[in-house]
Image: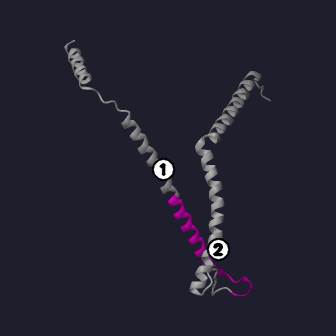
Amino acid sequence: MAKIDKEKLKSVAGSVAGKGKGFLTEFKEFVLRGNVMDMAVGVIIGGAFATIVTALTNDFINPLINSIGGAEIGGQILLPWTSGEGAQYLLWGDFVTSVINFLIMAFILFLMLKFVNGLVALTKKKKEEEDESEVVIKSDETILLEQILAELKKKK
């Protein structure tokens, strides 16, 4: 059996332990970074919002479509090559409901982004106006003195 150098083993163990600590510190910094937390909040709110949109579609929109069209949205079609206990159905009503859910979610997301972009543009516009208002208007004497100073610098 080969001899193990204890000093080498300690240095390897120390470097591995040090890397582990650095990894955990890096992970902590990553998780606590603002955009990761914002993303997590967005995912949670999006999941809750999806449930609301699904309820809206199933409880309000589908019954309205059913009352207008006279047919049930939650329909299904029996596949002709299957029958008996192993019968397979195409649940076209569920697909239509999912498409409606997607369109509602996409439209609301579009409106939210449009609102946020409008706020960002408004804030940017106000900042530009503040920057413009800070511009100091120079008197004729100041301009003349600056020109004289520039001429003197050229002669040196």
**Kind of residue indicated by mark 1:** Leu
User: Start and end of the magenta stretch?
Assistant: 83-111
Magenta span dominant secondary structure: helix
Q: Is residue 93 magenta?
A: yes
Q: Which color scheme is applied?
A: one colour
SS category of the residue bearing label 2: helix
- Quick one: quadrant of the C terminus? top left
Question: Residue drawn at (63%, 54%), measured in percent from left and top?
Answer: 43
Marks 2 and 1, the one that precedes in the sequence: 2
Residue placed most toward the observer, 127 or 66: 127
Percent position of residue 144, x then y:
22, 22
Q: Mark 2 points at which residue?
A: 58
Dot 1 alpha-carbon crowd within 10 angstroms: few under 14, some 14 to 19, many 20 or more: few
Q: Answer whether residue 17 is magenta in the image.
A: no
> Which one is in front, 112 or 7?
112
Residue bearing the label numbered 1: 119
Give the structural element (helix, strand or loop) at label 1: helix
Kindly check if marks 2 and 1 are in contact, taking CB atoms under 8 A apart as contact: no
Q: Nearer the viewer, residue 39 or 83?
A: 39
